[in-house]
Image (cartoon, rainbow, N blue to C red):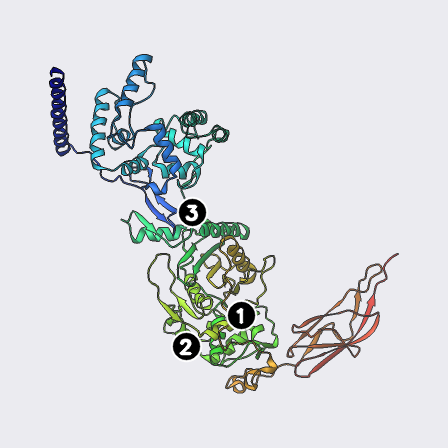
Amino acid sequence: MSHLRHLLLALATTAVLGTAAMAGLDALDRVYPPPLEPPATSTEVVDRDGALLRALATPEGAWRFRVTLDEVDPHFVDMLIAYEDRRFRRHVGIDPAALARAATQFITNGRIVSGGSTITMQLARLIEPRKERSLTAKLRQMLRALQIERRLSKDEILERYLTLAPYGGNLEGIRAATLAWFGKDPKRLGVGEAALLVSLPQLPERRRPDRHPQAAEAARDRVLARMITAGRLEEREAERARDASVPARRHDMPFLAAHAAERALAENPGLPRHELTISRRVQEGLEAVARETAARLGSRLSVAMVMADAQTGDILAEVGSAGFFDGARAGWVDMTRAVRSPGSTLKPFIYGLAFEEGLVAQETIIEDRPSNFGGYRPRNFDLEYQGDVSVRTALQMSLNVPAVRLLDAVGPTRLAARFRRAGVTLALPRDEAPGLAIALGGAGLTLRDLVRLYTGLANRGETIAISNVAGERETAAILDRRATWQVADMLSGIAPPEGAGARGIAYKTGTSYGYRDAWSVGFDGRHVLGVWVGRPDGAAVPGLSGYASAAPVLFKAFERSGLPVTPLPRAPAGALRMARADLPMMQRRFSAPGDALRQPGVAEPAPQIVFPPQGARVELASGAGSAAMPLVLKLQGGRAPFRWLANGRPVEGLWRRRTANWQPDGAGFSTLTVIDAAGRTASVKVFIEQDTPTP
C-alpha cells in the first residue's frame, strides 16, 4: 500500500507541477509574447512561373526571400532535420535527450562537442539575436521555443527558419543562398549542394565557400558522413558529392527585364511581390541576343524587343535596351515605349485593306514606276523601279510606289481608323490628318504598339492588347480573316536574311527616313516578335536597314527564345491563291480611279543604254582556258521587265532591274538592243576586245 501511495503522490505532484508550468507559460505568453511578426523580406519581381527576375534588398541591406516548403527540395529538408534536429517532428520545442547528450559531452570533454539546440530554439535565436552565449541566454531560447511551438505548426517553423537562417555575408534564407551560391532556386538541389547548405548556418562566415573553401568543404563532408551513418545516403552517392568543388564566387542576384521591373516597382511601390507574364527563359534568350547584337553593331547603337503571345496578349519577353547601365547607349531609356517612325512595317495592313475591298489579289499586276500623288513623289529604298510587278512581289520587295498607290485607293484615314479600333493611335504632326506618307513611316509608333497590331496577323485578324501584367485584354478586328490570311501568306514567302535558317515565320522589315530606325516584326501561329535597332538619341546611322540590321536579330531571337514554332493558321473558307490567268479581268491589273489624271504631263522616259555607250571599245579579261568575263549592261528609263538582244539573238533571261549580264561569244563588233514592257527599244554598237592570256 505504501508503494501505491507514493506512486499516487508522484503522479499528483507531476500533475500539479505540469499545471503550474502550463499556467506559468500562459502567463509568460501574455506578458512576454515572442516577436513572430513576418520578417521583412526583399521586394521581388517574378516571372509567370514565380522565377525571380529582379529583387531589392531589405532596408538593412540583406537578401532575404520568403519561402514555402513546397518551393524547397524535400531531400534538403530531410537532410537538415536529420542533421540538426532528428526528433523535430516529435518534440515540443526542446529535446531533453539532445540536451542531456550535449551536457554529457561537455562534462566528458571539457568543451562543447555538439549543441542541444533544436531547430525551434535556433529560430528563437534568429528572431531575437543576442551576442552573449550564456546559460541564461540558452534558457531564454528554450522558453521562446516552447512559446513558438504553441503558436506555429512544424511546417511554419521550418519555413520561418528557412527564411531567416544565415548563409554568409548578407545572405539570409535558403532562397537567397541558392541564388547566390548556385545561381538557381532551391527547388532542386544536388546532394553536395544540400549538404553545404545544411552546414553553413552554424558558422556562416567561417564557412563561406568563396572565402574559406577548405572549411566549407570540410563542413559539407561532415554532413555527408553523418547522413551515411544515419542510413540516409549511400557511400557512392556521397563520394560523388565530395568530389565536387564548392562555389568559388557568389552569383549576382537576377537582373532581368530591367525596364519592365522598374515600371512595376514604380507603379506599386509598397507591393512585396510583383508578378509579370514574362518568361525568364525567353527573357534570358532575348537579352543575350540584344547584348551580342549591340556589341557587334557599335558602341552607340541599341536593340529593343517585345515578344507576345498573340492569343492571350501576354508579353513573354521585353528588352528595353541592350544594357540598362550602358551610358553610351542610353540604356536606361525604354525603347519599347519610344515613339519612332515605323518605316515600311505598316504596309501589310494597307495590302490587307486592299484585299478586303477586292481591289487586288496576290497575282494582280501593279505598277512600280515614278508617280506623282498630288505633289508627293515616293521613291523606292534603292532608288530603282521594277515596272509591272505582282502584288505579292511588291509587298515582299517592300516597294514604295505600289504601297502608296494602294493606300491612296483605300484611304489613309480609313487605315488610321482601323489602327485606332485596335487600340493604337498614330502620332502625327499637330492638327495634321493622316496622309499617304503613312505607307513609308510618316507617323509615330512604339514597338509595343507595332507588336499589338501584328497580333492581328498572327491571330486571324483579331488584335489583342498586350501587357506584362495578367488581366483581361481588349480585342478588336483589324482585318477580316481572308484578307489576313492573304497578307500572312505573302509575308511567309519572304526569304530569311543571309545566314538565317527558315523557321516557318512570316515577317516584315522597315527602315525609317534618314536611316534612324531599323525594324523587323515576325510571327508564327502563336507568337509575335518585334525588333528595333538604332540610336536612342535618334541620330542617323548610315547603312542601317531593317533587312540587314533588324531581320537577323529577329530570326536569332526566335531561335534563342526556346519556344516551339506554331504553324501559321490555315486558309479560311474563300481564301485562295489564284494564278493571274484565273483572276477576274478587273483584278488582273490594279488601276485606281484617277490614275490617268494623277500625273498630268508626266511621260515615262523611253529606255536608254548608258553602259556600254555607243561606239565604245570594251576590253574583257579572260583566264587561261576560260571564256571572257561577262559584260555588265546598264540602262535608264523604260518600263520593266526588259528583254536584251545581242546581235539580234535574245540574251537569256527577263530582267526586272536596270542591270543585266551578257557573255560575249568572241571579239569584234556587236549590237546590243533592249526592249521594255511598252515595246520601246534602244540600241548601241560596241567593239569587244579580249586580252590573250600568257601561256
- C-alpha span from label 1 to label 3: 41 Å
> How many C-alpha atoms fall within 10 Å of the one at disc 2: few (<14), some, or many (≥20)?
some
Count numbered badges in the picture. Answer: 3
The residue under label 3 is which amino acid type?
Phe
- Taking the view exactly as shown, the residue that stands out farthest to the front is 1
Mark 1 and mark 3 in contact? Answer it, CB < 8 Å: no
Mark identifier at residue 325: 3
**Which tag, 2 or 1, sits closer to the chain's start?**
2
Front: mark 2 or 1: 1
- C-alpha span from label 3 to label 2: 41 Å
Q: Residue at label 1?
A: 489
Which quarter of the image is occupied by the C terminus?
bottom right
Along the viewing direction, whichever of 555 and 114 lies nearer the viewer: 114
The residue under label 1 is which amino acid type?
Asp
> How many C-alpha atoms fall within 10 Å of the one at disc 3: few (<14), some, or many (≥20)?
few
In the rendered image, residue 694, in percent from the top left (x then y), is placed at 87, 57
Q: Residue at label 2?
A: 413
- C-alpha span from label 2 to label 1: 26 Å
Determine which quarter of the picture holds residue 112: top left
Q: Is residue 116 left or right of residue 454?
A: left
In the rendered image, residue 449, in percent from the top left (x then y), is placed at 41, 64
Looking at the rendered structure, the secondary structure element under dot 3 is: loop
Mark 2 and mark 1 in contact? Answer it, CB < 8 Å: no
> Is residue 423 positioned above or below 6 on the image?
below
In the rendered image, residue 409, in percent from the top left (x then y), is placed at 48, 81
Determine which quarter of the picture holds residue 674: bottom right
The residue under label 2 is which amino acid type?
Thr
Looking at the rendered structure, the secondary structure element under dot 2 is: helix
Mark 3 and mark 2 in contact? Answer it, CB < 8 Å: no
